[in-house]
Amino acid sequence: MIYSAWLRQLHSLTIVIFTFIISAQTDVPRPRGVSLSKASLYSPTKDFTCFDGTSTIPFSYVNDDYCDCFDGSDEPGTAACLNGVFHCTNAGHRPQNIPSSRVNDGICDCCDGTDEYSTPGTCSNICEELGKEARAKAQQLADLHKAGNHIRLELIEKGNKKRSEMAEQLSQLEKDKTEAEKIKIEKEAIKNELEAKENEALKVYRDAEEKDRQRRAELARQQEEKEASEQFARFDSNSDGILTTDEIKVVNVFDKNKDGEVDQDEILHFFGDKDSVNKEDFMSTTWPILKPLLMADQGMFRPAGDEEKGEETEADEEEDAQRVEDTEDLGGDDENIDDAPHEETDEHDVDPDNARTYDDETQKLIDEATEARRQLTDSERTIREIDSNIRTFQQNLEKDYGLQQEYATLDGQCLEYEDKEYIYKLCLFQKVTQKSKNGGMEVGLGDWGEWAGEEGKKYSVMKYTNGIACWNGPNRMTTVHINCGLESKLTSVTEPFRCEYKIELTTPAACDDSNLSQQTSHDEL
Ligand code: MAN
């Protein structure tokens, strides 16, 4: 213990002497590895308090190659603490902080070589050289920003103009919409008025049509009744008004299964649970089942698509059926069905809404109402178009085009980039797409989302989200990293993670000389 304490004191003494040799080179004396800004925290006349406040130690323990502070702050110039920080001044270039574990490890980390002080001569001071290079580069960058800034100022001017024009156009569209809505109301009133007149005129036709329909229905009913009644009379051989099982047993048509006799099942089929039917029962129960059989027997069922029958109506068919029945089934009882009143094939038979002709006055009213309907539809379409334009303008006005609208004129501009496999297209503030050079569909890599640069640099990264879903994965998305350049162009497109794309874009909108001077002035001496 005693020996180690003595050793430590001796060690400290050497280090302190060494420290002051080093600090003599700068204006402010400070222990090795300490930056100018932290120099005041290391006062040789006071005890040293670790930065984390956990302990206070004699100043001689600073840089004594023994780690006393948890945060490593007592050993900025040695590798004793794992978490220590060594500061190299790098006069002539940029100062640097390195992990103190790299001190005296045989590798030159600082361009002034101060991190390898235990073996003088290992590292030469190349700061002047590096500094010169860095300054030349910085100058180039500054020149670029300066040149680009002129274009940026123009973009700002144009952007502001575009925005105010959009605002004007939007308010004009809103006025247009009010006007278009007024017109629509007028057109609607005119349409209602003319449609009322049209309806009134058409009512005459509709009423006539309805009457006609009823007349035809009544005729068909009478025809049916006549037919049924004739058949009843034909089967009721003793004409007593009752059709008995004996009477139908001799009529072939009741032999449904064509086995040569009318059996009990067949009687049950035609009579229900009765032994006989009167004319009324026959009409309601027997006739509806019997009629199709009669017709089938006589080949009266018309196969689908039979051309010959053409446009005959159901009533016509029934009349035809009756005619054949009358002439064939009843064997020469030549009742001339053609004498029966036939339907006139006038305009009322035709589909009412189609090829019908109207009297001139009605036709005129229809034409006027049709024109009014067309005008109303037109006015409604105009409103829809205005609405859609309003939405577009509103969406654009809501877009963040940068603090000074420097990005506004870039909205909608499309830039392309080709690599070996794909052609990428970025339409700024709209979308990103990818198209394989071997053909195939464009794949959406994201739609305009938001600015996503880190704090203080919000406008350096754009995010396009919600692209086409990745196979078994999330939707594709793209980040656009923006740097100053004299023209807007894409300088690289990569896919660092599957379906996550990274585009590098240069544009004068990102050139800002005031920004640049702020960035460079952060370097600490
Ligand atoms: C396509 C392209 C690629 C993407 C794969 C994912 O081939 O969009 O960029 O990585 O799909 O399946």
Image (cartoon, rainbow, N blue to C red):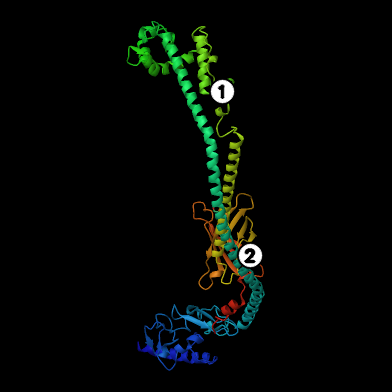
The residue at which mark 2 appears reads as 491
Front tag of 2 and 1: 1
Badge count: 2
Q: CA distance from mark 2 to mark 1?
A: 82 Å
Residue found 50% across the figure and 11% down from its top: 326
Q: Residue furthest bottom?
A: 45
Residue 478 horizontal/vertical position (percent): 55, 61
**Which of the two residues, 250 or 114, is positioned nearer the viewer here?**
250
Helix, strand or loop at label 2? It is strand
Q: Residue furthest front?
A: 361
Helix, strand or loop at label 1? It is loop
The residue at which mark 1 appears reads as 344
Residue 37 horizontal/vertical position (percent): 49, 86
**Which of the two residues, 273 or 113, is positioned nearer the viewer here?**
273
**Which of the two residues, 449 or 309, is positioned nearer the viewer here?**
309
User: Whereabouts is ligand 1, in terms of quadrant?
Assistant: bottom right
> In the rendered image, which quarter contains the N terminus?
bottom left
Q: In the drawing, does residue 14 fall left or right of residue 440?
A: left
- Disc 1 residue type (three-letter): Glu
Contact, mark 2 vs mark 1 (Cβ under 8 Å): no
